Each structure stands twice: as structure tokens, then as C-alpha cells.
Amino acid sequence: MHSVSLGLVFLLVLTGCAFDNVGLLAAKVTPGDGAYVVDVYSIGAYLRTRPDDPGLLLGASRRSYVFSTTDETPPEPGWHYFFVPIPQKGTWTLDSRSFGVDVRAAVHDAGISLGYQETTILAEVPDSQSTAFVLSYSPDNPAAARLRLCDGEGRC
Amino acid sequence: MLTRSVMLALLALPGLAACAPTQVYVVHRTVVGLDAATNLQQTNGHIILGYDRNFATIVPKSVPAENGGKETMAVLSCSELEVSGIYLTGFTEHLATGQAARDFAKNLGDDTKTKGFFSCFKGN
């Protein structure tokens, strides 16, 4: 079973393809303050089925996912190749920069672009949720990511 | 052929999900090239050739109200964006929703209670 998985990864890398968190990918995990950032770099065909970021890209991209450290244990900081640790938990923010043909299939964002496109989702909160947060993020300085959660009385 | 099938399946997904927004959604987008997109209800869309930058917030309008009806979701938000040329270089998003938004709204003038959480509203 293990060798079959390795074979599939090898096949994806050889063909210049990636599927979710496997294939021709590199990712860097960077811890921040109350948050951590997973920057995923792809080149070639990249099919994503994450509920918050579904789509298909033919080209090159950097997708940055910001997660809360309170949601789950962060992956090992540093670089990861071909099999990247992207938690399935929903992101607090998502920044994507891509060049090529990008087909987007998210609920709020369905379309296709050809060329360069940069999308930053600053917040995505279900209508049933009572929450308060302050999130600071700089795409080129992931270590400065900061997430602070509070209630309406200022208890953080 | 496989790629074509996958693309058709992906394009069909929004049609299956055509319904009222159920999430607060704050987004920034820059496009250089060609971009075609549709809204959630697929009642309108756009095709852009060239350069475009958008900043948008979607607030659900049909959350259950205390009287049994529907109302717009309570949201208190302050977005600070830093841009350089066509690129977004950073942002700070202050956001409260639901009961937390109502509580913050009541306490906005009292910094001892909000502890500067919505410092962007100071002086407004």
C-alpha cells in the first residue's frame, strides 16, 4: 500500500501534476503569533478539492493558508516537498497568487481567469457563528501573521 | 479528455450550490489578463480583459431572528489593507459576528471593555 502511494506521488511529480497536497508541490510552514501559515507553491496542473479552495490551475501559483494554533497542532515548521502538510481544517485567511489558467469553483467565487490573478479572502465566517477576531497577515512576511480571538466583552 | 471532464465538473459545482449566502465573506482580488466569473445566484457576472481590482464584503441577509423571522446578520468589521502597485502587501481584519458583534457594538465607546479590539473605530 505504501509503495502504491509512493508510486502515485512519483507519477504526479513526473507528469508535472499535483492533487490537493500531493505531487509537484513545495510548501513552507511558518509559525506566527496565534496562527501559522502554510505557503504552497505549485507548477504545472494543480487540482484542489478543499471546500474553501476548490479549483484547477494550469500554471504556477503560491497559495497561502493561515490556520489558528488553537484549532489543531501545527505541522513541522520549515520546507516540505511533494507531500505537503495542509490541515483539512478551514483556513482563517487564504491568499492565492497564480499565473496561468485558473478555474475557480468556490461557492462565493466561481469563474475562470487567464493571466495573473491574486485573491485574498480576509474572512469567511458561517452565519450561525458568534465570533470576534483580529487577524494581521502579510503575504511576503508570514512570520508576522497574528491572530487574536475574543468575545464581545473583550475577553481574549 | 480527463482534464476536460474535470473542468466541466468544476464549472457545474456552483450551479449545484446556487442559494443565498450563508457566510460573511470579505475578499480582495486583482486580475491582470482575462477573468470571467459569476455570482452565487448566477444572475449576473462579468468578463474583464485587462486590469481590475475589487474589494467586496458579502453579508448574509437571512439569519434567524429572535421573533422567528429573518434578519441581516450582525457584523462589525474594519479592514485595513496595504497595497503596493497592483499587489496586496498586507492587511489587518477586525471582525465580529452574531452576538459578539452586538456586544462589541454596545461597548465600542468603552475601551476598558473592548480593550482596543476595534481600535479602528476610535474617533469615529
Image (spheres, helix red, strand yellow):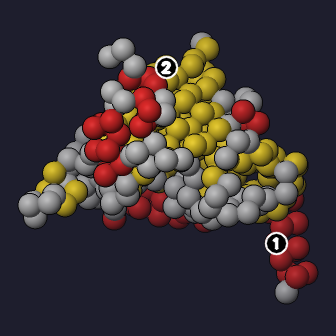
Label 2 Cα crowd, 10 Å radius (few <14 / some 14-19 / many 20+): some
Left or right? Give the position of A149 relative to A7: left
Q: Is residue B95 above or below residue A104?
A: above
The x and y percentages for residue A137 are 63, 33
- Residue named by callout 2: B51
Three-letter code for the amino acid on which mark 1 is drawn: Leu
**Residue at image x 63%, y 52%?**
A68
> Disc 2, disc 1: CB below 8 Å?
no
Q: Is residue A6 above or below residue B44?
A: below
SS assignment at label 2: strand
Residue nearer the viewer, B58 or A56: B58
Label 2 to label 1, Cα distance in Å? 39 Å
Left or right? Give the position of B37 relative to A1: left
Residue nearer the viewer, A146 or B109: B109
**Residue at image x 51%, y 61%?**
A51
| Location of the N terminus of chain B (image quadrant) | bottom right
The x and y percentages for residue A106 are 46, 53
Left or right? Give the position of B16 relative to A4: left
Q: What chain letter is assigned to the residue under label 1?
A: A
Q: Is residue B97 above or below residue B11?
A: above
Three-letter code for the amino acid on which mark 2 is drawn: Tyr
